[in-house]
Image: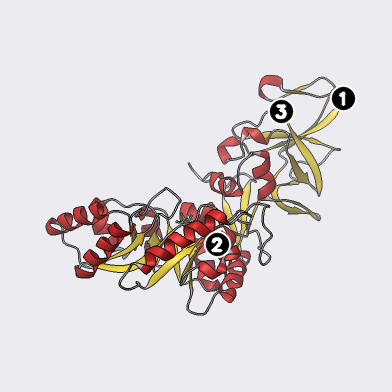
Amino acid sequence: MVVSIHRPTKAIIDLKAIKENVENEVARLPKATNLFAVVKANGYGHGAIETATAALEGGASGFCVATVDEGIELREAGFSEPILVLGIVSVADIGLLSHYNLSFPVSTNEWLQEAAAFLQKNPVTNPLKVHLKVDTGMGRIGFISNEELLLAVKWLQEQSMFTWEGIFTHFATADQADDTYWQEQNQRFQTALACLPELPRYVHAGNSATALWHAEAVGNMVRYGIAMYGLNPSGTTLPETYPLKPALSLVSELVQVKLLEKGAGIGYGETYITPQAEWIGTVPIGYADGWLRKMQGFSLLVAGEYCEIVGRVCMDQLMIRLPRSFPAGTKVTLIGEDNGQCITMQKVAEQLETIHYEVACTLSARVPREYKS
Ligand SMILES: *Cc1c(COP(=O)(O)O)cnc(C)c1O
C-alpha cells in the first residue's frame, strides 16, 4: 500500500519519548543486564529503523525482531548490534542467518539435526548463534522436556558451526495482578537452568511486563517491547513502575464541514440520522488505515472538544458531529493530546475490545509516520 503523504492524516512519533522510556529502564537494570529493544512488526507500527535508532541512543545494546526479514531490514540499515529473531526460522534460511549475523531460537533437537544435514551440503561462513527456547507454560515454542534441552546443549557444545549464545523463556501472565502462574513458570525456568552444565552468554526471561513487575527474574537481558513505546503492558491492570511516555499520536484534519438539516442520513446503511440540524465534519481516515468500523460512537478531539463519530466508519473517511462550525483544515486528534485533553491508545483499544498492542500494529502502511526528536 502506498504511503499517502498528500492527505492530512499522519502518525507522529516522538522519538525522544522512546529514548527516555529506554533510558528509564536501563537505569533500573543491574549494570551487567542488557536491554534488547523489541522492534518487530515495524516497531509495533512506530517504524523499525527510527525506533531502533532512538532505543540505541537510550542505551539499548541489541534488538529483537519476529522474522528473518525484519532482522535483514535492520542489518541493511546499518545496525551492527546483536539481533535476535524471536520466531522459529526455517532450516532453509540458515545461509541468511549466517550472512546477516542473526541470532535465532531453537525449540527441538530435530531442528538441529536437520540444520546439520543442511550445512553439509550448504556450508556457511559465520557461526550460527542459537538461543535455546524453553517452554515453561506459554505453550507456544520451546523445549518442554529438560532431557531434550540438555541433549541440545551437549550437541551444540560439540559443533563448530554453532554458537550456543542464549537460553530463554517467555511468560504468559507477567502483566496480571495474580502472579501464581508467573511463579510456576519462573520455577520451571530455574529448574531447567539448574540442569545445564554451564550457562550461555545471554539468559533472558523478561518482556516489558516482567521487566516492570518482576525485575528480580530477568536474567542478564530484557526483551523490552511495548513499554519502550510508552504503553503500559497491562493496559490498566497494574500501575506503571515509572512513568511511560506514549510515543505515538494520530492526527488528521477536517476536510469538509457542513450544516445538515434534521433527518439527514450519515454514512453507509444510514445508521445515524441527525435528530436536529447538526454540524457534521468529514475526516480522511477509515478502516483501510486501521481505524476500524467498531470505532463508530467513539469521540475524537477537535480544538480540545470531544466529537462523536457518527454513522459507519468508511474505508477511507469518517464523519463526526461538531458542536459548531469549524473551518475545513481544523486539526483532528484521534490519538494523543489536544488542548489539555488526551485520547490514549488504551481508550481506543477498549472501544475495540482489544489491547493497545493490536491498535498500534493495525495502523496501516497508508498512514505516513512523521518523526520528531
Ligand atoms: C513480542 C515479544 C516480546 C516483547 O513483549 P512486550 O510485551 O512488548 O514487551 C518479548 N519476548 C518475546 C518472545 C516476544 O515475542
Q: Is residue 128 above or below residue 302?
A: below
Residue 265 located left or right of residue 244: right
Q: Nearer the viewer, mark 1 or mark 2?
A: 2
Say whether mark 2 is within 8 Å of ligand 1.
no
Residue 81 located left or right of residue 304: left
What's the residue type where badge 1 is placed? Answer: Gln
Say whether mark 1 is within 8 Å of ligand 1.
no
Residue on which disc 2 sits: 210
Residue 81 seen anywhere in this rendered image of the structure = no
Residue on which disc 1 sits: 276
Q: Residue at x 67, y 28 (%)?
A: 312
Q: Between residue 320 and residue 83, name the one nearer to us.
A: 83
Whole-Å distance between the Cαs marked 1 and 2?
A: 52 Å
Lower position in the chain sequence, tag 2 or tag 3: 2
Whole-Å distance between the Cαs marked 2 and 3?
A: 41 Å
Q: Residue at x 48, y 61 (%)?
A: 186
Lower position in the chain sequence, tag 1 or tag 2: 2
Residue 311 is labelled as 3
